[in-house]
Image: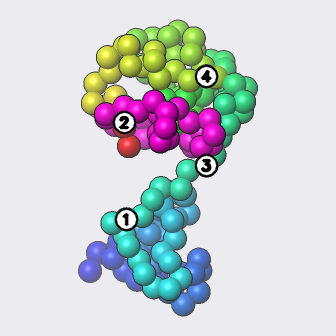
């Protein structure tokens, strides 16, 4: 039995047992805690993301504090600015706002899309979403 498979008493849900991985993910708000009734649909868990408004994002618009919105998700890319292959200017130029169109126009690779997860800090509230809401713009391949 691996360390990840070891069962622990979960302080989150009373007498229910949860794996270390499930507890860590719950603590990081990457998944919902297993249901208290014992129905643990591990394959069907949703990520619980912090709701961040566009107004709040707009305050993070500088080189020292740089947030952007891509596909209705919010990313703190401050630590990535120096590493960006296209230079930091293009990122800071879009800081504090939705940069989805600029991101699409740059023709990023699949690896760039996957690396977004490293910087994700939340998502827009449903009333501010454009790409991930029914009845609004839709895209065939949204990053996870």
Secondary structure under the numbered disc 4 in the rendered image: loop
Q: Which residue is painted at 53% across and 56% down in the image?
A: 48
Mark found first going from the N terminus, 2 or 3: 3
Mark found first going from the N terminus, 2 or 1: 1
Q: Which residue is painted at 37% across and 37% down in the image?
A: 143
Name the residue carrying label 2: 142
Label 2 with label 1: CB-CB less than 8 Å: no
The disc placed on residue 97 is: 4
Mark found first going from the N terminus, 3 or 1: 1
Can you give x and y, in whole percent of width and height, for residue 121 in the image?
56, 42
Mark found first going from the N terminus, 2 or 4: 4
Secondary structure under the numbered disc 1 in the rendered image: helix
53 lies above or below 105: below
Can you give x and y, in whole percent of width and height, for residue 1 in the image?
26, 80
Mark found first going from the N terminus, 1 or 4: 1
Mark found first going from the N terminus, 4 or 3: 3
Q: Which residue is painted at 28% across and 24% down in the image?
A: 109
In the rendered image, residue 140 lying in the magenta stretch gets the answer yes
In the rendered image, residue 139 lying in the magenta stretch gets the answer yes
Name the residue carrying label 3: 50
Q: CA distance from mark 2 to mark 1?
A: 19 Å
Q: Residues within 10 Å of mark 2 (few under 14, many from 20)?
A: few
Which residues fall within the magenta stretch?
114-141
Name the residue carrying label 1: 44
Q: CA distance from mark 2 to mark 3?
A: 19 Å
Q: Residues within 10 Å of mark 3 (few under 14, many from 20)?
A: some
């Amino acid at each position: 039995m691996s360390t990840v498979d070891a069962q622990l008493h979960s302080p989150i849900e009373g007498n229910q047992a949860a794996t270390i991985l499930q507890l860590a993910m719950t603590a990081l708000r990457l998944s919902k805690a297993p249901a208290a009734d014992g129905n643990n649909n591990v394959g069907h868990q949703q990520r619980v993301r912090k709701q961040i408004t566009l107004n709040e994002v707009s305050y993070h618009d500088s080189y020292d504090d740089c947030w952007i919105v891509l596909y209705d998700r919010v990313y703190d890319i401050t630590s990535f600015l120096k590493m960006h292959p296209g230079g930091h200017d293009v990122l800071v130029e879009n800081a504090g706002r939705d940069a989805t169109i600029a991101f699409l126009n740059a023709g990023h690779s699949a690896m760039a899309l996957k690396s977004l997860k490293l910087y994700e800090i939340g998502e827009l509230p449903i009333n501010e979403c454009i790409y991930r809401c029914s009845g609004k713009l839709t895209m065939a391949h949204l990053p996870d």
